[in-house]
Amino acid sequence: MKRALLFIIVAITALFSCSKGYDAIAEARAQAEVDDKIVQDYITDNGLTASAKRIDTTGVYYIVVAPGSGNDLFTNSTRVTVAYTGRVLTTGQEFTKSNNFPPSFALGEVIRGWQLGIPQIKKGGTVRLLIPSRYAYGPYDQPEICLKKNSILDFDIRLLDVTN
């Protein structure tokens, strides 16, 4: 009898605690709507409507500054050497820069916004990427680069080399 009563109490407690739980999916969708509006407003307010192109349905936009040349095939294991500057779209605050030593990355190791945007150009090309937070660092602070959670990013990237 005591076990049955204990089971009923635990079951009722679990039932009521689940109904008031955290809904990560709803929060992510709400943040996506906020991000997409900010990016759209930025594009409109800065006269980028003609040059900014959306990558599929992602909300990531790219502007080809210089297309580059070559027939580069991009996969997750493709190594790219890039010179870049990263800013927070809403404030213009620069939070990262490659400086004099352009790094190389496997494309699969970088944020999803880069994975989608870098293949829009070829070796020697330059692209500007406007990246909603869900394709960057999402709801996670990045204290090592002084970046707050849900930051929308604005990158200028020059593709120096591509190795497959």
Image: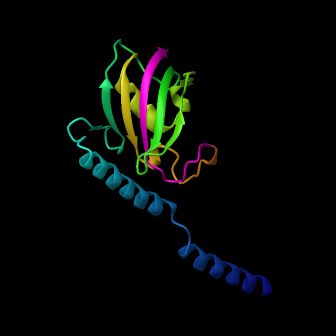
Span colored in magenta = 145-163
Q: Whole-percent x and y of residue 79?
A: 52, 20
Report the residue at 63% width, 76% height from top.
14
- Give the answer, above or below, for where 106 lies relative to 124: below
- Give the answer, above or below, for where 159 lies relative to 136: above
Question: Is 28 left or right of 41, judged from the image as shown?
Answer: right
Q: Which of 117 and 65 is in front in this view?
A: 65
Q: Nearer the viewer, residue 136 or 146?
A: 146
Question: Is 66 left or right of 163, judged from the image as shown?
Answer: left
- Location of the N terminus by quadrant is bottom right
As drawn, the residue found furthest toward the left would be: 50
Report the residue at 32% width, 37% height from top.
55
Question: Is 66 one of the magenta-colored residues?
Answer: no
Q: Quadrant of residue 56?
A: top left
Question: Is 149 one of the magenta-colored residues?
Answer: yes
As drawn, the residue found furthest toward the right would be: 2
Q: Whole-percent x and y of residue 3?
A: 78, 82
Q: Whole-percent x and y of residue 84?
A: 47, 29
Q: Whole-percent x and y of residue 43?
A: 28, 45
Q: Nearer the viewer, residue 14 or 1?
A: 14
Report the residue at 46% width, 17% height from top.
160
Report the residue at 43% width, 50% height from top.
91
